[in-house]
Amino acid sequence: MKDSLNRLDQLSRRQFVARTAKTALGVSILPIGGANRLLAAGGGKAEHCIFFYMSGGMTHMETFDPKPGAETGGKTTGISTGVAGVELAEYMPQLAKRFNDIAVVRSMTQKTGDHRGGAYWMRTSYEPRATIIHPSMGPWAQTLLGKKHDTLPDSVVIGGGGEHPGAGFFGPALAPLPIGDPDKGVQNSAPYQGVSEDLFEKRLELMNTFDESFRRKFQTDEVKAYTQFYEETLKLMKSEDLATFDLSLEDKYEEKVARYGNTRVGKGAMLAKRLVSSGVRFIEVVSGGWDMHNDLWDAIPTTGGQLDQALSSLIDDLKAEGLFEKTLIVLGTEFGRTPVINANGGRDHHPRVFSTMFAGGGIRGGQVYGASDAKGIAVKENPVEAKDFNATIAHAMGLDLNKVIYAPSGRPFLVAGHTRDPKTDAIVTEGHPIMELFS
Amino acid sequence: MTTRTFKTLLFALSGGLVLTMASVSSVQAEMRTWTSADGKTLQADFVGTAGAGANAVVKLKLADGSVTSYPIAKLSEADRLFVKGNLPTDPAALAAEIDKLVLNKLKESYYGLRDELAALPQKTDLTADEKVKRKEEIEKEMQMCIPNEMTTDNQFLRRIYLDIAGRIPTFDEAEAFLNERAPDKRAILINDLLDSEGFVMRMYTYYADILRIREGITMMGNGDLKVDPYMEFIKQSIREDKPYDALVRELLTAKGKVWENPAVGYLISDQGMRLCNLSNTFTIFMGTEITCAQCHDHPFEEVYQMDFYKMAAFMGTTDTRARGGNAMMMMGSGDYRAEIDRMNKVLFDAGKLRPNQTVDQNLGQWFGTHRTQVVELENNVVKLPHDYKYDDGEPEMKVQPGTYFGDKTDLSQHESPREAFAEWVVSPGNPRFTINVVNRFWKIAFGLAQIEPVYNIPGHLDGQAQNYELLTFLEEMMKDLDFSVKDFFRVIYNTKAYQREAETLTPSLTQVDKGTYHFPGPILRRMTAEQIWDSLVALTTADPESVIRRGAEEYRQVMNVDPASLQTAEQILQWKEDFRNVSKLQKYSGEIVSREDTVDGVQMFRASELRQPMRPDHFLRMFGQSDKQLIENQFTTGSAPQVMALLNGTITNAVLTSPDAYLIKEIAFGKGSKRDNIDKIFLSVLSRYPTSEEKSVAQSGMRARTDRDMSEAQKLEAEALAIGNVIWALVNTREFMFIQ
C-alpha cells in the first residue's frame, strides 16, 4: 500500500508539471472536456455559474430575511413578492418582482465570525489551515469536468483582491484569472500607450535576436515553456478572446450600464454575463461594503439597491438570451449581522444565521428554504452550512460530490468537504445539496 | 575568518579564568597532553589542522620541534572537541573537499550507467521498445555526469549577485568586477556580498517565505497586530550572522509580546492553530512532513498518530493569547476597559467621532492587540482527538510529551516542555535538524536540493541513491562552522561545483525524485519573483539597497504608551496617527520615503522592504511572490499575465525606458566610459557585452531613427527612444529571466 500511494504521489506531481508547462491565460491548454456532468435529480443543468460574493458579511435582515415589527428589525420594512406570506426587505424591490425566478435560503449558518475564516469556509467548504490551501469552486469544476473552452480561462474573479483561495493545491495553472476593474478588463492586454504596432513588432524582433543564443544553448523544459507563453500570449493579444473581457464592446453599452447600474457590482454583473456568453464557466463577482458596523441605514439603500439592480438586470438578460436555464446564479457572504443593533447604529458579525440566494441553472424559483427565528437570531429549521451551500452549487453543475482528489501531499479532498462513511470507512462528501431547490 | 579568531580567543580566556592570570603564560609554555581514542597519550603543541571531513588531521609539534599529523577521528572525545574549536574554516579547503565528493559521485554514477548500458541488450525483462527508451535515458543521464565548463566571469558575476544579494549587479558593480585583476577576485566578491545589505534582504525573503511573515499576521486580524519588530529581528539575525541553531531556538522558545520580544512572531503566525504550528515546525526545521499523522497514522512513513500528539504535547502548555481581565495588559496602572471608555468619551465630547458613533472601533482593537502574546499555561491542554481510533489510547485522553526519533528528553531538566522541545530540535542528536538546513541551503545555491522535496527527507538516507558522503560532509561542516550561515554559503560559493556553468539539460523527474542528479553544475532556473523585481530595481538606481523599512522601535513606543497620558482628543488622535505610521521606508540619510517617491508611479524598492506580501495584482505576485499563507508558497511557473506585464506594462514601457529613465539618462548618456551606449545597456541588463551581431542589430535601430537634418536635441531624443527599445527587448529575453 505504501508503494502504491507513493507512486500516486509521483504521478500527480508529474501531471502537475505537465499541466504547468502547458498554461496559457493562467489556465492550461489541456484537452477540453474530460468528464461528463452528472445529470441526476434535477442537477447538472448549470453549464456556467456566476457567484456573487458579498464581502464583509451581508445583513440578512435588510435583504432576504426582513423582520418588520420585531424588536430587532430596525426600520427595515418588507416588500411583497407575490407569494403569500413571503416578503423581501424593502431594499430589494426589483428582485421581489422577480421572485418567481429566485430561491432564497434563510437558514445558513457558519462556524466563525471572522471575515477571513468565514470567507474561506464559504469558498472552499473547509476550515482554514496553516498547512494547505483548499481550492475554490471554479478550479474544482475544471478539475472534475475538464476545461470548458480551448483558449478562455475556466474561472474568473472580478473585483477580488485581498485573500482568495484561488486554485489552492491545484496550483497556479488553474488559478482564476483576476479582473480588478470590470471596465479595464485584463491587465496589460493592449500595447502600452503610444507603442504602435510597428514599434511593437520591431521590439519583438530585437528580443528574438538577442535571445537566440541563449535559447539555443538552454533547451530546458522551463525555457521552452516560457517561449511558448510568449507565443500564446501574442496570439491571445490578437485574438477575439480578449474582446470578451472588453466591456465597452458590449452591445448597447450605455443602455446596459444605466440598467445594471454604473457601479462595481453592476458592471461586474455585466462582464460576468458577457463572459458566460463567450463560454467561461465560473465567474465570481466580489462586491464589498457590507461590513456595516456603523450607520447601517445610511448605507443599505445604496449597497442593497446596487445589488438588487445588478442581479435583476442579469436575470432579465440571461433569460432574454436563453442562458438562464444553463447558468446558475448564486449569492453568498461570510456571515450575517447581529439582530441587536449596536451603539453606532450598525450591526456586528453574526455567524449563527444568515441568508443566501440561488437562481437559474435548474433552480426552482419562487421558494424560500429554511427559516430563522422570529428575531433573526438563530436557525429555526433546516440548517445549511457552507459545505451544503457548495454541494448545492456542485450538484447544479453536475460535479461528482464523492470524487476524491489527492493534493500533492497525498491528502484526499472532495468538492464539498469530506468525512468517512462510518460503515465502509470510505471517504464521502460531508456537504449535501439542498435537493428542494431543484425543479 | 572571524569565527576562528573568536573561538581561539575564547579558549584562551576560559583557560585564563580557571588558572588565574599569572599562570596563563605557563599554560602556553607547557605542552598539551593529547589522548587518542584508545587511551595513548602524547605531549605536543597544537599547530593546526589540515584536510576536512573524514580526512581531517591535526598537526602537532613534538618536543624535538618536528611536526606530525594525526587523524582527528582517532582522537579522544575531549581532544576532538578541542580541535573542533580550531578546525580550519578556510573556505577553500572545505570547498575542495566538497568538489572531490561531487566529482567522485559523478564518476561513480557515470561508470554505473555505462555498465548498465552495456548490459542492456542482454536484459530479458524489457521489451525492445523499453530498451530503446531506457537507452535514451541512460545516455542523457551519462551526459549529466560530465562536469560542465567553468563559468566565465560574466556568468559567475550575474549568478553570484542573484544568489547572494538577490539581484543582478548594477552597471558599476559589473564593470568593477570585470576590470579587477586580482586572481582571487571571485572569493573577494563572495566575501563582500555576504557582508552586504543585499544578502540580508535576499535571505530575509527566503526566511519570510518559509516562516510566512506577513502584514497583519494573525488569523483573526485585519492587520491590527503589526509585525515590524519580527521582520527586523529576522533581518538583524541575518546581518549579524546569528548561528542558525540559535535563531531556531529563539523562535521556538520566545515569550511575550511581539514588540517586546520579536521572536514570538513565529508562534503568533499560527495563532490558535497549535497542531498546524507543530506540523509547520517539523516541515521547516526538520524537513519532515507529519501533517497526515494529525488525523491518522502516516500512510508511508513511520509516524503514528500517537507520535504526533506526543510531539504536540510539548507545545501544550503554550498559548498565543493572554486571557483574563486587565492583568495581561501590563501597561500603565489604569483599568484597560475603563481607559478605552474614557478615551471614547473624550473623542465623542470633542466631536471627533463620526455622526451617530459613540465608539471608535480602532481604539479598542488596537489596544486589544496586547492580548496577542506567547504565554505559558499551568496545564497541558493537548489531548487525543475525539475520534481517536487506535488501541494505544482513548479519545480525549491527555498525552505526555515524548519524541519519536532522535534523543529522549527529560522534562525535569527544563523550565517548560517547550524549552525541552526546542533543545531537542536543535540538538546534535536530532538526525534531521542539520541535514534539513544544509539540504535547503544547497538548493539556494544549486537550484535543486540533494533530497527533493526538501520538506520530506526520508528517515533512512543511506538506502537512497543520493550522494550520502556529500550530505553527511555538509552536515558535519555546518556543525563545525557552528551554524554560521555566512560561512556555510562562503564555502559553497567557493566550490568549483558551484562555479561551473549551469546544466543545459533538464533533470528528469526520476532523477529529481531519487536524488540521482549529481550536479555537473547548478541547474538553470527562473529567477524568483523577488529576484526579478529586485533586478529591475537595480536597473533604476546606483544603490538598490538604499531604502530600508523601519518601524520596530516606533511600534514599541506606540504600544507601550501609558493610556493615562492620552487625555485630550488631540493626544488620542495623535496616538492613532502614530500607530498607523509605524511602518515606514527610510533612506540611509534618515529621510522618510513618501508615497509619492516613485518612478513613473511605481515604488522601485527592494521587495523585502515593501508590503508583505504585495497585493494580488502587483507585479511581484504575478511572477509568483508567496502569499505567505503557506510555507514556500511562491512559484516560478509562467503565465500569460506575466508576459503581458513585461510586454505592455509600466516597468518595461516607462520605468526603464522613458528618456528620463536611470539606464538612459545616467548610464547610457551619463557615464564617461570608453564603452558605447549599447555596451553599457547590455552590461546593465544581462551583465555581459553584446556580440558583434547583436551590436549591429541594436545599432541599426538607432541609425534608422536619426537623420542628418535633426537638431542635436532631436537626435538625442531619437537615440533615447532607440536605447529604450533595446532595454525593452533585453528585459523580455529568457536570458534575463533565467539564472545561468
Image (tube, rainbow, N blue to C red):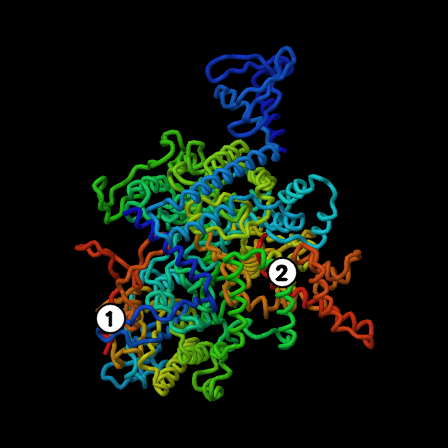
Extreme residue toward the front, this view: B122
Task: Give the numbered dot on residue A401.
Answer: none
Other residues around mark 2 within 10 Å, as few (<14) / some (14–19) / many (≥20): many
Residue lying at 41% horizontally and 42% vertically, measured from the top left: B119
Residue A6, percent from left and from top: 34, 49
Q: Is residue A20 visible?
A: yes
State which quadrant residue A30 falls in.
bottom left
Residue A368, percent from left and from top: 25, 77
Task: Give the numbered dot on residue A434.
Answer: 1
For residue B273, above or below residue B397:
below
Other residues around mark 1 within 10 Å, as few (<14) / some (14–19) / many (≥20): some
Q: Front-most of A94 and A22?
A: A22
Q: Is residue B115 left or right of residue A193?
A: left
Mark 2 to mark 1 CA distance (whole Å): 51 Å
**Disc 1 is attached to a residue of which chain?**
A
Q: Front-most of A371 and B237?
A: B237
Task: Give the numbered dot on residue B604.
Answer: 2
Q: Name the element at disc 1.
A: loop
State which quadrant residue A266 falls in.
bottom left
Q: Identify residue type, mark 1.
A: Ile
Q: Name the element at disc 2.
A: loop
**Disc 2 is attached to a residue of which chain?**
B
